[in-house]
Image (cartoon, rainbow, N blue to C red):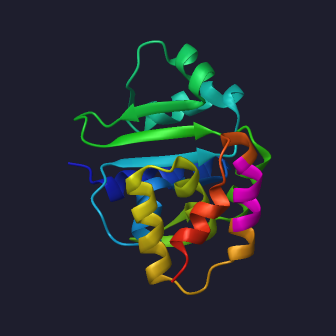
Amino acid sequence: MQTLQSILCKIANILDRENIPYMVIGGQAVMIYGEPRMTKDIDITLDRDIDSLPLIKKLADELELKPLIKDVDQFVQRNNVLPVSDSKGMVRVDFIFSFMPYEHEAIRRANKIDITGTRVSYACIEDVIIHKIVAGRPRDIEDVKGILNRNTVIDKKLVVQCLDAFSGTVGHDLTAIFKEINKN
């Protein structure tokens, strides 16, 4: 049986082989920087837009990851994400296609972290915080608190700058949320 970690490493190796820059985000990144928690999914932002869907479908097939939706092309067009799962349905992987300049910059800032001998590209700590605050669910806010509790070196200027930019898009003050969490 494949473990979540072994699937992540296989994905990293294939994306590196194909010269596709990427970053792991979500719960997997939180486990690197914040409080450990249980998660059975892998979220990967690709430095590719949806024009690369045929290649990503081919790579997912090579990884023995099957789409979780019927009309893959239409779903990806609408959502910019290809959700797939291992054969037993135990591990979900979301391949997220990037379309914003912020995503491309975040991928360039990503950190390579050794996972059982494989160099895996994780979003930097600041971008994990930004993603979590933009998502804004209670779990995400708890994740940010855990990250801030475990790390003293964070580029808060970058976090605030990006959150300010996203605040106009989402219609509320994301920077205020960060400042409230970061009071301690």
Q: Could you tell me if residue 1 is visible in this image? A: yes
Residue 61 x/y as whole percent: 44, 30
User: Which of the 4 image quadrants contains residue 54?
Assistant: top right
Figure check: 18 above or below 153: above
Residue 35 x/y as whole percent: 36, 72
Residue depicted at 47% across the width and 47% down the height = 43
Q: 21 or 80: nearer the eye? A: 80
Q: Is residue 14 magenta?
A: no
Figure check: 102 above or below 60: below
Single out the residue that lies furthest toward the bottom: 152
Q: Is residue 166 magenta?
A: yes
* Stretch in magenta: 160-167
Residue 109 lies left or right of residue 122; in this view the side is right
- Numbered label tally: 0
Residue depicted at 41% across the width and 73% down the height = 146
User: Which of the 4 image quadrants contains residue 23?
Assistant: bottom right
Residue 183 x/y as whole percent: 55, 79
Q: 70 or 62: nearer the eye? A: 70
Residue 104 lies left or right of residue 35; in this view the side is right
Q: 61 or 73: nearer the eye? A: 73
Residue depicted at 54% across the width and 32% down the height = 81
Q: Could you tell me if residue 124 is visible in this image? A: no
Residue depicted at 59% across the width and 66% down the height = 178
Residue 135 x/y as whole percent: 52, 48
Figure check: 135 above or below 56: below
Residue 122 lies left or right of residue 36; in this view the side is right
Main secondary structure of the magenta stretch: helix
